[in-house]
Image: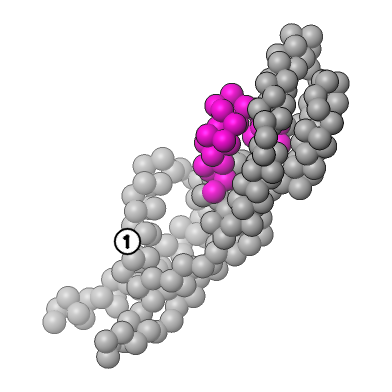
Amino acid sequence: MLDHEEKFLFKEEILHLASALDEAGALDNVEDLLTDVITSPRFDSEVFTLERSLQVMLGPRAGTTLVGLLTVAPDVFDEVAEVRIPAEVQERLVAWRARFGLAIDNALNFLNNPDGIQGHNFSTQIAHVDDRRVLQGRLTLVRYNNEPQFFVADANVFYALVADLLERLGPYSDGDTIDPDVLARLREAVTLLERRAAPRERG
């Protein structure tokens, strides 16, 4: 819950936001923007720039306030009902929070704390490129919202990715960081790779 000073500041921000939203066409323009963002196939990148877009539309202060209001804790949002603002603005704010708030909050949390990979899968395939057989990998990452995202690239791209990961994680890792079974798999994989690559090197 907000203390007395926080309530005063919150009221000031809501009044300023309501004034910006009460301008002609502002409510519909904001709703169109929120709808476009939430339905965009590039949702994450659109959410990343949402606050800036709202700042351009409503002004820096009001744009920031609106993003915060859509994602604030429920008990804080309930304080809006205590502020005297136009009824239509109040209704839209409630509707926007119900319709867009959770998705935007989840996306912003993921962008600010990008640890949302819940699972992964990796497979290989052979592609025919310019009459050549090319080994490729297919990486599937299961994201924070349970939607899979797929990446297909030539094997060298994934080998470079693995090397980058090990180089950057290695200096900071210890016995608590990596599971012994995973470490054993890494050793076996490197041994196999060296054995498979050796004939080509001798040739």
Tell me which secondary structure the magenta stretch mostly adopts.
helix
Q: Position of residue 189 (x, y in %)?
A: 39, 68
Residue lying farthest bottom?
A: 131
Residue 121 appears left or right of 174: right
Residue 110: image location, x then y, percent:
59, 45
Q: Say few, some or many: other residues with alpha carbon within 10 Å of mark 1 (under 14 / 14 to 19 / 20 or more).
A: few
Residue 186 falls left or right of residue 37: left
- The image quadrant where one finds the N terminus is top right
Q: Please give the residue where the numbered disc 1 appears in the rendered image.
A: 160
Please tell me which residue is depicted at 53% across the width and 43% down the height of the picture: 48
Q: Amino acid at mark 1?
A: Ala
Residue 191 found in image quarter? bottom left
Task: Note whether 128 is above or below 4 in the view shown.
Answer: below
Q: Residue at x 80, y 42 (%)?
A: 95
Is 48 magenta? The answer is yes
Q: Is residue 107 visible?
A: no
179 vs 8, left or right, is left
| Position above or below: 9 against 101 | above
Residue 137 in picture, x, y percent from top left: 42, 73
| Range of residues picked out in magenta | 46-70
- Residue that protrudes farthest toward the top in the picture: 5
Is any atom of residue 50 visible in this view? yes
Pinpoint residue 143: horizontal percent, then vertical percent. 60, 57
- What residue is shown at x 35% (from left), y 79% (from top)? 135
Residue, far front: 24
User: What quarter of the picture does the C terminus occupy?
Assistant: bottom left
User: Circle 1 — which element?
Assistant: helix
| Colour treatment of the image | one colour
Q: Give yes or no for residue 193 being in the magenta stretch.
A: no
**Residue at horizontal 52%, vertical 34%?**
56
Viewer-closest of 33 and 106: 33
